Image: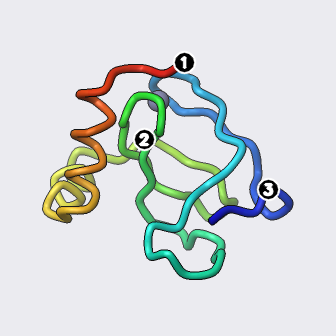
């Protein structure tokens, strides 16, 4: 699921929620994210992209349009946004 020892603390660019863990949706063992991998803020559902240093940035409009074609990303984003903020 996650490994706090290998994860750098980061904040959402949109809601500033502090991430202290990450979750690999494939269900396999922990793998550090690769540059360009998408991630979603668990608090507000904003779409972000991992940078080469393991931190995140806001996805560009082009990246957002590409990511939304992925049903897992689309479903997760919709669920989080419909649920509302948790923090
Ligand atoms: Zn957020």
Instruction: Tell me how far mark 3 sits from mark 2, CA to CA.
Output: 22 Å
- Determine crowd level at label 1: few under 14, some 14-19, many 20+ residues with C-alpha closer than 10 A: few
**Residue at screen point 52% across, 67% down:** 24
- Lateral position of residue 5 relative to residue 61, left or right: right
The residue indicated by pointer 1 is 87
Residue nearest the observer in this picture, 77 or 33? 77
Q: Earlier in the sequence, mark 3 or mark 2?
A: 3
Tally of marks: 3
Quadrant of residue 23 in the image?
bottom right
The numbered mark at residue 4 is: 3
- Lateral position of residue 56 relative to residue 26, left or right: right
As helix, strand or loop, the secondary structure at mark 3 comes to helix
Q: Position of residue 43 (x, y in %)?
A: 47, 30
As helix, strand or loop, the secondary structure at mark 1 comes to loop
Labels 2, 1: front one: 1
> CB at mark 3 closer than 8 A to ligand 1?
no
Q: Position of residue 18 (x, y in %)?
A: 66, 31
């Amino acid at each position: 699921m996650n490994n706090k020892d290998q994860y750098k603390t980061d904040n959402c660019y949109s809601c500033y929620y502090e991430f202290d863990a990450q979750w690999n949706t494939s269900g396999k063992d922990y793998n550090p994210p690769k540059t360009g991998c998408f991630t979603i803020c668990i608090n507000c559902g904003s779409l972000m992209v991992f940078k080469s240093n393991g931190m995140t940035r806001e996805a560009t409009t082009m990246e957002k349009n590409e990511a939304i074609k992925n049903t897992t990303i689309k479903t997760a984003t919709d669920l989080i946004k419909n649920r509302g903020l948790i923090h």
